[in-house]
Amino acid sequence: MKPGKLITIEGGEGVGKTTCLRYLGAEIQRQGMDLWQTREPGGTALGEALRHIALGHEYAGMTEKAELLLMFAARAEHIHRKILPALQAGQWVLCDRFIDATYAYQGGGRGLPQDRIQWLEKWVQAGLTPDLTLLMDMPVKQGLKRARQRSVPDRVESESISFFEQVRQAYLARAAQEPERIKVIDASCELDDVEAQVMVVLGEFFARHT
Ligand code: Z5A
């Protein structure tokens, strides 16, 4: 059977990932692919419980190392129980955030050493990397304004502007390192323009992989 593909969507606060996931998922299915949509942290019973711990305000003083390990604990479970079986069965997996979020938030935002994240990535993911990543990018203040109009901030969303600037720069640095995989979308435009950019990237990906 044709192996499935792993597509991830990334970006800072309020960049429109949730909005984009709707039409992205619909288009992948319209192209005839069997799609499974998921998110990180989360996607399994344990992963969702870890998400609640990691993002809730209950453990507000959590150490950075604990936060990093929670993300990888959720990912280990997600990959082993859900993502690999789905890919092996030929499904396309569309995941709201994945490893690039760890480099951006725990690496860029929290300042944890890249080599530790790389070590955990190698161990937990054992070579599994996304086939395509859409990085929704926009100025931090604009994204935070959108996000905060929509819902009450969680523990990570309550961080400072400078934290989110570091997150954004870390994402952009990864995109510069891996331009074939990570496609930057200007998420500051009108919804229709954002969708048009996403469809171009997806069209090119389909042309190469189907
Ligand atoms: N995290 C981590 O630290 N390390 C890791 O390894 C992983 C994750 C995997 C998960 O949050 C948190 O986990 C995240 C990083 C951390 N923390 N934070 N903060 P999430 O991904 O579930 O949620 P989020 O990042 O907070 O996303 P969001 O708030 O749900 O925003 P969004 O999905 O990007 O945006 P949206 O809901 O689609 O849009 C926001 C609003 O803007 C909404 O009202 C839309 O209607 C509007 N919108 C969207 N697009 C437009 C355009 N183009 N114009 C105008 N208005 C728009």
Image (spheres, rainbow, N blue to C red):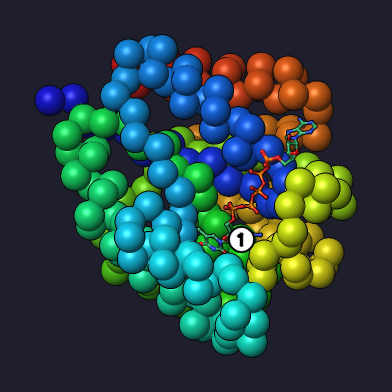
Quadrant of the rendered image containing residue 170: bottom right
- Residue 196 screen position, x and y as percent: 66, 17
Q: Quadrant of the N terminus?
A: top left
Q: Residue at x 76, y 46 (%)?
A: 150
- Residue 198 screen position, x and y as percent: 60, 24
Q: How crowded is the residue under tag 1: few (<14 C-alpha within 10 Å), some, or many (20+)? A: many
- Asked if residue 114 shows in the view, the reply is no
Left or right: where does residue 66 sit relative to residue 109? left
- Residue 81 screen position, x and y as percent: 22, 55
- Asked if residue 105 shows in the view, the reply is yes
Q: Quadrant of the C terminus?
A: top left
Residue type marked 1: Ala
Query: Mark 1 highlights which residue?
Result: 104
Q: Is mark 1 within 8 Å of ligand 1?
A: yes
Q: Nearer the viewer, residue 191 or 7?
A: 191
Q: Nearer the viewer, residue 40 or 5?
A: 40
- Residue 168 screen position, x and y as percent: 72, 55
Element marked by disc 1: helix
In the image, residue 114 sits, relative to residue 173, either above or below, namely below
In the image, residue 72 sits, relative to residue 90, either above or below, namely below
